[in-house]
Amino acid sequence: MPDITLEQAQISIRAALEKAESINTKMCIAVVDTGGNLKAFVRMEKAWLGSIDIAMKKAKTSRYFDMPTGEIGEMSQPGRELFNIEISNDGLITFPGGLPLTNRDDEVIGAIGVSGSTVSNDLIVAEAGETALSGHFLYSEKKV
Amino acid sequence: MPDITLEQAQISIRAALEKAESINTKMCIAVVDTGGNLKAFVRMEKAWLGSIDIAMKKAKTSRYFDMPTGEIGEMSQPGRELFNIEISNDGLITFPGGLPLTNRDDEVIGAIGVSGSTVSNDLIVAEAGETALSGHFLYSEKKV
Amino acid sequence: MPDITLEQAQISIRAALEKAESINTKMCIAVVDTGGNLKAFVRMEKAWLGSIDIAMKKAKTSRYFDMPTGEIGEMSQPGRELFNIEISNDGLITFPGGLPLTNRDDEVIGAIGVSGSTVSNDLIVAEAGETALSGHFLYSEKKV
Amino acid sequence: MPDITLEQAQISIRAALEKAESINTKMCIAVVDTGGNLKAFVRMEKAWLGSIDIAMKKAKTSRYFDMPTGEIGEMSQPGRELFNIEISNDGLITFPGGLPLTNRDDEVIGAIGVSGSTVSNDLIVAEAGETALSGHFLYSEKKV
């Protein structure tokens, strides 16, 4: 089972932090590993305290189902097939801002969760973290 | 009080596992007893980590109300009589995939909960587990 | 990161069950994977209900620190260096009955937790589960 | 209210990481702010999963009482005045490895918590994080 390293988690977090600054937001950013356990976390100055737990739960939720949190949120609306799934697993967060992280073989090695602004901004910052890690794998591959 | 045995729980789980494999899904499967307490559990390779708790909660929910989880889910929608019942009992899951298990006298002796795919697939696998146990009782009866 | 398969978990559980029966005890037996998440679980007839959670917590505790639970328990006594560590991680169990499970390269791939009798019996049954899996790896190795 | 910045938390964590590597340990390192809320966290490869929560709880405990965790642990032993204080605050950890972090005016601005080895190693690594931050303040002061 492949797993994310601390170096890789930090590549992802660093890129997410830069994006968060560039769009003038104050974020909490969490990365979990393959087992869904916390690998790394940062909170920017003046980020909402309530976002600490949400960022972690977004990362966990994304790894627990290997999909973007927002996709689960669409299916958990009233009348949809996964209504109130958020109650499970000691609490899930199913709005956007959580994304799986994959290696060069497209295997899930963890997930990133971002909270602190609008959900669209949260997602933009999570995508920056995800893209940086994909780029890192691509670059490492080329080097060899 | 009639209660499921471990052997019966394993008959149900084995049939559910076979069905899960035959429809190419990766499932978590839980069986609880008459008291609603976990009797047996298995997680297939690459099943969603988030499905561990959901399978257990589906089984618990089904036994707690002696009905398929999906029936409760219909009554827990916004505006319906059981709105947000999921918040009770340390968390219920009310979408399909949980079914009561009964003995030959049609008494509830436990429940099965399945999670890991679409809710329709979850239900198909749960039904396979329920049917196998019913068949076992039927067969044992005939034997005597 | 190596991880236990369901087949391997079941080899371990089956051996533990046989040992439990042979010494006339009623056990709960849990196996977790590398990430500390539940892989498989069984409860024998008339096993204590309170042992469901203890077996799971023993397995989790053993994997969380990659050592037998009893070793942690010695260090967590009053006046010792890890006093009251049990309060962490949503509850640990630090008396004997939890053991790491390793593959043929001696890497931890999960853990087994047993509860339902005296702690010495719990440990005997956990050892049976651990030994069976080691033997399985040894045998598979020879086959090649 | 003075408070730790993310940059300062990272100075502390970086120094702790270097110390952990230099003494060949695998650590979880957490920093909380003045409010006791998580500011930053890292987990090294192969660090115990159980240390994630313990590192966080050590940092929280140290800030909640503005003293090294080990000092509280001495007072929480059987027969002492704070017996079983660990049960409060959703769980405290009172063995060594948590230290307050202060600014140049000696005001507490947060705390660091380290877990992953013997408690004496945990403390050495926490001290490295604490010392680095003190040095940073000293150096910044001189610069002006």
Image (cartoon, coloured by chain):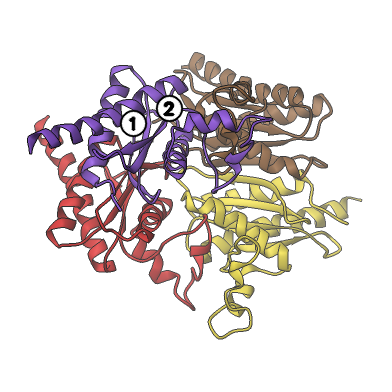
Chain colours: A red, B yellow, C brown, D purple
Q: Nearer the viewer, residue B57 or D47?
A: D47
Q: Residue furthest left?
A: D144
In depth, the one of D114 and C40 nearer the eye is D114
* Same chain? Circles 2 and 1: yes
Q: Earlier in the sequence, mark 2 or mark 1?
A: 1
- The residue indicated by pointer 1 is D44
Residue named by callout 2:
D116
- Residue A14: x and y in percent read 19, 45
Which residue is rendered at x = 47% and y = 48% of the image? B47
**Amino acid at dot 2:** Gly
Left or right: where B16 falls relative to C124: left
- What is the x, y in percent for residue B143? 88, 50
* Numbered disc total: 2
State the quadrant of the N terminus of chain A. top left
- Looking at the image, which residue is at 49% across and 71% down? A81
- In the rendered image, the vertical position of residue C35 relative to residue A28, given as above or below: above
Chain designation of label 2 = D
